[in-house]
């Protein structure tokens, strides 16, 4: 069986490094906000060329902490994409605020920046673009809108660690960038983990206070905070994997190239579009197909996994039924019916990639 991701192979390759480092951290016993957490934060900030990187318990929490920092209120609105994982909108809704969904671009599957302006009201507080599947949203355009309307720009970079918008890493262009280290992400740990990046000293200070029970000085609490910290063992793993992230992302790009070279020859298949302003790191390799279910069945019969990200756009989710979100978003709705993601991970061999692509090629109509 070829799975969507193969974490076992990666662990086997890294265990000589990871096992002793974990044992050393266990012996240290500084499990919360310990030395590996601060070292990882510094190393991640250096890698991404951002002033501050502050870890937390998950990508969802990263979004929550970012929104806490801008004091999001129930009457506020936040503009985002409907074609993403639920967490992006969940974070907004936790504050009682309204996620306002703007349709996506048919080529990149990222928020359509031409449609954002019409969605801005005097209640709009922020825009959260998602760099879907590892490819940067059109941040230049979004930044211009944010400046013109005095909005905060929070990047959901959960799927795009190491990818770039022009010369800058995603997550370092807006006011804050939110990352997830969920095991299957491009940079993943062995449990839950997250991080917020910012160039702003005041925001960095606030995030650190919010993640630690609203406390700057121990047992003195000035604001209502959260308990959301990355644990020391996850930091140990992330420090090791950060050294490999560029090679991992390059391997993903090589797999994507093998897929595209074969599949672009078939007219009925739409291969992933690469924007000229983005360096796509292929968290997912996602095609559009006319006969998706049939292709999925054929792959399954050949022991090849495939997955639909995302079958139900967020504006159509039951959880938002009462939120007065009765929009029709035709591009998102169409793409969610046609999209299919193929296995992609650094350890996938060229032979496997060719075999998968040829199977898709013959099954597509
Ligand atoms: C994974 C993901 C999140 C949430 O991250 P967790 O670490 O699982 O909480 C948020 N946004 C997007 C786009 C994601 O893919």
Image (tube, helix red, strand yellow):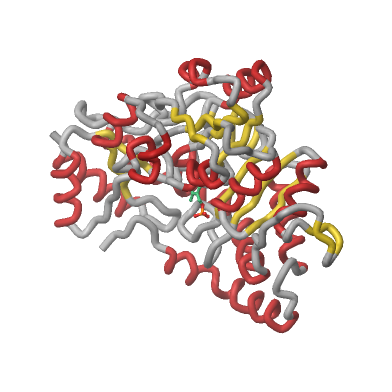
320 vs 2: above or below: above
* Residue 142 appears in view: yes
Quarter of the image where one finds residue 26: bottom right
* Residue 43 appears in view: no
Picture residue at 29% right of the left edge, 31% below the top? 333
Quarter of the image where one finds residue 287: top left
Q: Which one is in front, 46 or 69?
A: 69
Q: Which one is in front, 282 or 144?
A: 144
Q: Which one is in front, 291 or 78?
A: 78
- The x and y percentages for residue 106 are 36, 24
163 vs 213: above or below: above
- The x and y percentages for residue 162 are 58, 44
Quadrant in the picture for the C terminus: top left
Picture residue at 43% right of the left edge, 45% below the top? 85
Task: Kindly give the residue lying farthest to the bottom in the view shown.
Answer: 27
Q: Which one is in front, 360 or 353?
A: 360
Number of numbered discs: 0
Picture residue at 77% right of the left edge, 54% below the top? 209
119 vs 193, left or right, is left
- The x and y percentages for residue 184 are 46, 57
300 vs 163: above or below: below
- The x and y percentages for residue 104 are 41, 27
215 vs 138, left or right, is right
Quadrant in the picture for the N terminus: bottom left
Picture residue at 18% right of the left edge, 32% below the top? 290
């Amino acid at each position: 069986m070829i799975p969507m991701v193969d974490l076992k192979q990666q662990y086997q390759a890294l265990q000589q490094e990871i096992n002793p480092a974990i044992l050393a951290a266990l012996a240290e016993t500084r499990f919360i906000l310990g030395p590996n957490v601060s070292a990882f934060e510094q190393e991640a900030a250096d890698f991404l060329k951002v002033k501050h990187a502050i870890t937390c318990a998950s990508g969802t929490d990263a979004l929550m902490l970012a929104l806490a920092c801008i004091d999001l209120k129930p009457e506020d609105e936040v503009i985002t994409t409907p074609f993403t994982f639920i967490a992006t909108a969940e974070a907004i809704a936790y504050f009682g605020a309204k996620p306002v969904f703007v349709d996506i671009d048919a080529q990149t599957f990222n928020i359509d920046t031409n449609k954002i302006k019409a969605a801005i009201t005097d209640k709009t507080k922020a825009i959260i673009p998602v760099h879907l599947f590892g490819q940067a949203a059109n941040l230049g355009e979004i930044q211009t809108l944010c400046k013109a309307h005095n909005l905060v720009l929070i990047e959901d970079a959960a799927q795009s660690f190491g990818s770039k918008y022009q010369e800058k890493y995603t997550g370092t262009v807006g006011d804050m960038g939110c990352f997830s280290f969920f095991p299957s992400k491009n940079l993943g740990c062995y449990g839950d983990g997250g991080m917020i990046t910012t160039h702003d000293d005041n925001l960095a200070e606030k995030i650190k206070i919010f993640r630690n029970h609203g406390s700057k000085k121990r047992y003195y609490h000035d604001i209502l905070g959260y308990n959301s910290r990355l644990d020391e063992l996850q930091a140990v793993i992330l420090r090791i994997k950060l050294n490999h992230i560029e090679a991992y992302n390059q391997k993903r790009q090589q797999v994507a190239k093998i897929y595209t070279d074969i599949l672009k020859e078939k007219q009925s298949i739409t291969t992933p579009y690469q924007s000229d302003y983005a360096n796509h790191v292929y968290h997912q390799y996602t095609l559009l197909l006319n006969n998706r279910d049939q292709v999925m069945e054929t792959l399954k019969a050949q022991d090849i996994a495939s997955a639909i990200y995302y079958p139900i756009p967020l504006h159509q989710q039951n959880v938002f039924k009462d939120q007065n979100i009765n929009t029709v978003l035709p591009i998102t709705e169409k793409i969610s019916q046609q999209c299919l993601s193929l296995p992609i991970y650094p350890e996938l061999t060229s032979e496997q990639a060719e075999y998968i692509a040829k199977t898709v090629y013959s099954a597509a109509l």
